[in-house]
Structures are given as structure tokens and as C-alpha cells.
Amino acid sequence: MIPRRENTEPLTLEQKVKKMRKERNITQYELADALATNQARISRIEKGYDKYTKREIEIIKKLLGIEGMPLTEFEFTSFKKRLHHWLGIIRAGRMDEAAKLREELSNVVNIEPYDKELPMLFRLFEITYLLTERDFEAAEKNLQMLANSLRTMSNECLFHYNCRVGSFHAMQNRHEEALIYYTQALEIMEQNKDFSTNDEPLLYYNLAISYTELEHMSHAIVFINKIPRSKFEDDTTNYILGIDIALAINYYKIGMYREAEKILNDCFVRANSVDNKFFEGLALQNLGIMHRYAENWEKAIKYFEQALDIFDKGTYRHAWTLYFKIRCEVEISKLFDLERELIDIMESPLKKYDDYSIFLKTLLHTIHLNRNMTRYNMNAVEYIENVAIPHFIEYNNRLEALDLYELLERHYLRTNKLKQSLKGNRAMLEIRKRMV
């Protein structure tokens, strides 16, 4: 819920000087002496009947210890542009340059007694820097500090705050929480026209990705189609490839296989042309998943094998791809041979990675249930119910959780365990409700 905010009009230059003068215990007489004028004139200025000259402003800044910091409206606007330039450098991944600018711009926090917006924007953009560096602890500390100032934030700062909290959650796979804040940012942007933002396409992108991760396909497609592609012409951002792959994922999840395949093949060609291995692997992996949904098992396996050659062993992507590949092989191969293959993999160095451990054990138990090996069935059911399915739900792969529930359903019906079957059906219904 967006907090009710206080009505705070921006201070005039003269009010800023008065506020900062008092913060530093400087009297009107002392300020008048520094400006070679009299106290009566300072009083008239602070009451709004007179103005400081350009020369006097430079003297005031020196006296207050804010040389090089913005004070006039022109300086404020110029500094704000520098902050947005810094944000662009962070998003482009030029982190060495971003680190230097961070140091230069950090002095803006010293102007907080007479202005809050620029220090807030600095801290908000600094959160993007910290998230890019994956320093979640420092990012959370900044967010907690800013949360105390929500009622005094401008619409622009409140917009950026919600975007950053959303990204903080999204980067840690908490997409339901992320969606709450992204939606609030969208509401602020749509209801307020007193600030302009270049972040609109990025917000649509983040909303689309969160809906994709939560498998709310129709919502994801709506936001993907809102994104103007011309905003992302810089190849270093990779946004266009990310947008297209997200669109393809949502298409194949609603059964639009032809459209998804065309997009994914195009993404692979484009990624290959710029030697972007990550997106090459991602396109191949999703081509495999698409063919798995379409039950083209051999085609799916072919794409998964190509993706495995690209993704580094020990990574989450490699673990998922291996899982999907073997799940397809279960459909067309001898289960005994696959069981031996899995045991060999589990005895390899890959077993030290948690994701591999869960995926491989899930696959082994899946094979046991498919082979209907009575002596293993109880352990298999217990592992799939209590470890595998909760893991897939936690990492927003509800379709895979449903697939495992359907495997358990077949087992329950085969063994006449109607009570467990009913319980599983209720769980599947709940998952489907969350996906709508």
C-alpha cells in the first residue's frame, strides 16, 4: 500500500540558505558581515522581499561548506542529470566508471539539511549499484533507511523506491513480493504526471519477468507487448533478447508452440552473432522445454544437450537443463539404464552442488515410481512430496510441481490410496489458482 505522504513544498533558495545557516548556528549578522552587507537586508531576503546575487551565492556556499554542491535551481537540475547519467552507466554494466562517479556524487548527502530529493535519489540509484554488485546486505540497509522517509518523498523518489524494493526481491527469487512493489511503482507512474521517467519500459520489463516467473502467462504477455523496443537499442543491455525469450516462454506455456519456436530460433541466431553464450544457452534450453511440453522428446533432448555444452557445470542453469534432459529420457528410454546413469552422476563431483543433489534425487525417485519398484515407492513418494515439490514451488516452477503431483496421482490410483489422491488433487487446484 502506498503511504499517505506529507505535503512538502520545495524550499526556495533563500529558505534553503536560512535553514542551513541555522543548522550551522550562523546568525544573520554573521552572514551579513561575510557578504559585506547589513542584517536588515538579510532579514528582507529571508522574508522573500529581496534576492541574493550570484556573487553572494558563491560566498554563502563557501561559508556553509557546500562548495561544488547544488544550491540554485539551475545547479539542482544539472546535478540531477548527473545522477541519472550515473544510473545509466550502472545499467550498462560499466562498473569501474560507476564506482568513480559514486565517489564523486556521494557528497550530495551533505546537502540534506536544505534538500532531501537529491540525497534520496543518490541513495536510490546507489541501491541499483549495490544490486548490480550483488551486495544485498548493503542494499537492504539503504532500503531500510529510506523506508523511514516515505511520507516526505517526492512522487519521483517514491516511484524509484518501489522499483528498487521490487528488484531487491526479484533478484532473490521472491517474485510475489517483487510484484507488489512493481505494481505500486506502476500506480505512481500512471497517477502522477508531475515527473517524467525513462524507467517506464524497464518497469514493464520487470513486471513481465515477475509474471513470467510466477507463470501468470496472460499478464506477462500484456506487459511484454507494452515495451517499446526502440528504448533498448544498446546491445550491451541485452534487454531485447531478454524480452523476446520471455515472450517465447509465455507463448509455449499457453500452447503457442509455432510462435515460440520462431522467436527462440531468432534469439539463438542473434545471440550467436554477438557471441553471447548465456543467451545462446537460454534460447536452446527453452527450445528444449518447449518441445518437452509438446511431447517431442527426442527434439527436446537434442536441444538440452546443446545447452549443456554451453552452461558451466555447477550453475543453476546447467542443473535445470540436466534435469529436463533426463526427464525427457524417462519418456523414451529404458528406465534401468537411466537409473544407472543417475547413480554415476550422483557419484561425480556434481553431487556437492545443492541444486544437482535435489534434481538428481528427484529424478531417481521419479524413475522408481515409473518402474513401480515397491521397495522404493514409499521413500520416493515422501521425497517428492516433502522435498522436490516444495523446492519447485519455492523457485516458482509450478508447472514442474504439477507434473510431479500428476506422477504421484498415477501412483496413488495404481495403489488405491484414494485419501492421498484427494489431498494431491487439492494441492494441484491450489497451485493452478496461484497461476491464474
Image: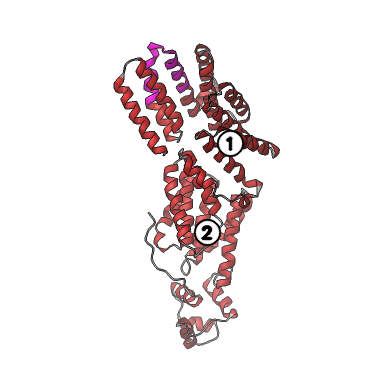
Magenta residues span 362-385
**Residue 147 versus residue 368 in the image, above or below:** below
Label 1 to label 2: alpha-carbon separation: 43 Å
- Front in this rendered view, residue 195 or 417: 417
Q: Position of residue 2 (x, y in %)?
A: 39, 56
389 displayed left or right of 207 = left
Q: Quadrant of residue 264?
A: top right
State the quadrant of the N terminus.
bottom left
216 displayed left or right of 84 = left
| Residue located 31% across and 25% down the image | 422
| Residue located 53% across and 63% down the image | 108
Amino acid identity at mark 2: Phe
Q: Quadrant of residue 47?
A: bottom left
- Front in this rendered view, residue 311 or 144: 311
**Residue 163 versus residue 294 in the image, above or below:** below
- CA neighbours of label 1 inside 10 A, class few (<14), some (14 to 19), many (20+): few
Which residue position is annotated with label 2? 122
Q: Position of residue 408 (x, y in %)?
A: 39, 22
| Magenta residue check for 59 | no
- Front in this rendered view, residue 125 or 260: 260
SS type, badge 2: helix
Q: Is residue 314 visible?
A: no
**Residue 426 versus residue 37 in the image, above or below:** above
Amino acid identity at mark 1: Glu
Which residue position is annotated with label 1? 259
Query: From this viewpoint, which residue is outermost toward the right?
Result: 273
Q: How many marks?
A: 2
SS type, badge 1: helix
